[in-house]
Amino acid sequence: MKRSISVFCLVILAGLFSACEKVIDVKLDSAATRIVIEGQITANAGPYKVSVSESKDFDGDNSFPARNDAIVEIKDMTSGVSETLVNKSAGVYETSSMQGVGGHTYQMTVRLSGKTYIATSTMPLKAIKVDKLYAKRFDLDADKIFMVPEYTDPVGKGNYYRIRQWVNNVLVKGSFVRDDDATDGRTYNNQLYYETDAKFGNPLINNGDLMTVELQCIDKGAYTYYRTLNTTTGQEGDTPANPISNISGGALGVFNACQSTNITSIAKF
């Protein structure tokens, strides 16, 4: 079926994020069920997790039936070390001993119902830390408060980022992604705009709230997935539409070998 979806895209205006409403036509198959796989490995201590589920009709809710009958393996293609993950909970498989290493390439293999799904991702060599995190009123609407993380892109193009944020340990839906193709070596200090209307269910920022930001350094394949996921669905967490996955075999989702750092601060404005 074909359905118009109203989404909000992010644009940079005078160094700030603002929102513009955009209508995108996305072709969705209301009948076909597809496997959804989401896996991540970092240079931080594990365990690392891979979730396996099934997609539902776009008009359905956002709960996806878990699959506990998969065989899931992650292999360090650089060192040759591999591990078969253990099914720990509904559709979630975990490592027990593997340690992610910056600069190494990892391959995830999922075997399920006679099919094999494979994804490869290379973990960036180094992590980038957020130097400062604070809250600021939005210049275009003083009633809205957003986080501002400051970090500096290292000189040399080819860096890709994904940013997630929490308010009082509650995750804000969606994430920001960017590359440094036009901003190589720049220090970023843009507000992280998100939907504050109650219908979206996101937490609001008030004085004294605990704010957390995660900055992931990701490879191009993961960047392409998250960028197109935000475009096709409007926010992560919706039923996957047609984002560009790095998983072969027809599965939806992504395998993300990334460097990850966090910063926490108290909102004061």
Image: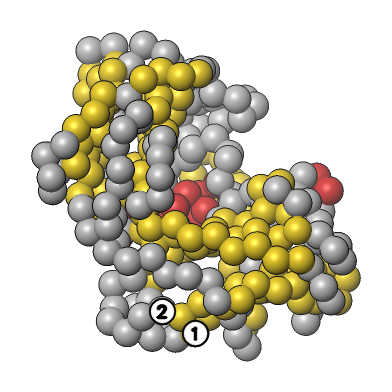
Image position, residue 20 (x, y; %): 66, 68
In screen coordinates, is 19 left or right of 185? Answer: right
In screen coordinates, is 24 left or right of 244? Answer: right
**The C terminus is located in which quarter?**
bottom right
Query: Which image quadrant for residue 250?
Result: top left
Image position, residue 177 (x, y; %): 48, 63
Residue nearest the viewer, comparing 113 with 43: 43
- Residue for badge 2: 153
Query: Which image quadrant for residue 184?
Result: bottom left
For image coordinates 44% across by 57% down, the residue present is: 260
Can I make out residue 236 in this image? yes
Image position, residue 69 (x, y; %): 36, 11
Image position, residue 237 (x, y; %): 58, 40
Disc 2 secondary structure class: loop
Question: Compared to 172, does 262 lie above or below?
Answer: below
Local crowd at mark 2 within 10 Å, few (<14), some, or many (≥20)? some
In screen coordinates, is 236 left or right of 102? Answer: right
Residue nearest the viewer, comparing 243 with 64: 64
For image coordinates 75% across by 58% down, the residue present is: 210
- Residue for badge 1: 187
In screen coordinates, is 5 left or right of 254? Answer: right
Q: Indicate which disc, 1 or 2, sits on the residue closer to the N terminus.
A: 2
Question: Compared to 121, does 32 lie above or below?
Answer: above
For image coordinates 41% across by 79% down, the residue present is: 153
Query: Which image quadrant for residue 189?
Result: bottom right
Question: Compared to 113, does 195 lie above or below?
Answer: below
Q: How is the image coloured?
A: secondary structure
Q: Disc 1 vs disc 2: Cβ atoms closer than 8 Å?
A: yes
Q: Which amino acid, mark 1? A: Thr
Q: Which amino acid, mark 2? A: Asp
For image coordinates 40% across by 45% down, the residue present is: 45
